[in-house]
Image: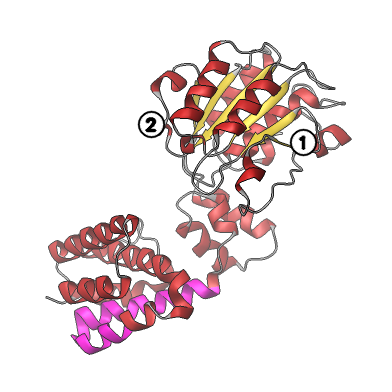
Amino acid sequence: MFSKLAGNRRVKETLGRLLAVRRVPNALLFAGADGIGKKLFALEIAKAFVCNSPDGLEGCDECPACRRVSVFNIPKPEKKDDFKQVFFSEHADVGMVVPFNKNILVDAIRELEREAYFRPFEAKARFFIIDDADKMNDAASNALLKTLEEPASTSHIILISSRPDSLLQTIRSRCQTIRFAPVETEKIEEVLLNTNKFSIDDAKLAARLSDGSVRRALSMDVAKFREQRELMLDVLQCLLIRRNRASLLQTAELMNDAKNKDSYEDNLSILLSLIRDIWILSLTGGEENIVNTDIVPPLKQLAENAESHRLSSWMAEIELLRENFIVNINRKVATDALFMQMAV
């Protein structure tokens, strides 16, 4: 069961103990960064309760009941009305609430409330997962609170959140919180290699860039990343070595071209990671904590031409620009301004 999932050994031990004494709380909060496997852990717990041929405490992962647990048919977020419900997997006792765009709809939580009071159809208990639970508004949160205050003994609700502090304190107080850590780089690299879709070098790079997120690593287009990184590396060479403002403005134009608009924020993230690596090299000279380990020579060259206080200022300016994406800013103008400010 949990042995098939990467990382988070302590979480596995905690959940294993709860299953051993059959004391899984009616309300759990799985907190941690996006893409580290919280939802997969939730589904594995459900399998332990629905399995027809359990292997000790664990679901066998092979019987029809186990296989049905993970199969959901969730539509694309095009029609709001489609998301006013609990989406059940092919197993009638395992359901999930997911947000429509950036909001979990109160109607979906109200349906969860109704469903939670039905007895299981074929399993020992019913399981409801609320994905991105921090996207509940006040109405949805209050509707859920009613269910958590008087939980049905045969229903379990698992909230998944990367921003648990955004949840109402009254909701958090009624859940047992399980905190997930980023998955170790070596574990992610192993997962990638087992897919047979990554070369050794690409797996190493994707694992280091993933920030501990297996999902992010698996979805990474490493070839595209290398192209984007080359463009951002050129920005830093223009700033620190060639001192070429005209090239900076040309790159800003390219970043904001219609064909590249979907990659804009990725490019900024890559630029930020390169600056951080150069900053680390300029301060320590050590390579242990940098991300882009496959391009150390050009990074060291840039570090030799950089001042640490200037690099830290650049990182702050990029973070400020990213925060401003919340409002409708002109990205081309903002990028020009950023690069010219960095060139001062």
Viewer-proximal residue among 11 and 160: 160
Question: Badge 1: how crowded within 10 Å, few (<14), some, or many (20+)?
Answer: many
> Would residue 317 be counted in the magenta stretch?
no
Residue 164: image tag: none
Tell whether 266 sits left or right of 322: right
Circles 2, 1 touching at the beta carbon (< 8 Å): no
Q: Earlier in the sequence, mark 2 or mark 1?
A: 1
> Would residue 250 be counted in the magenta stretch?
yes
Which amino acid type is shown beneath numbered disc 2?
Asp
Quarter occupied by residue 229: bottom left
Q: Position of residue 21 (x, y in %)?
A: 67, 12
- Per the model, the C-alpha gap separating discs 2 and 1 is 29 Å
- Which residue position is annotated with label 1? 69
Quarter occupied by residue 68: top right
Q: Is residue 227 above or below residue 116?
A: below
Q: Is residue 198 above or below residue 181?
A: below
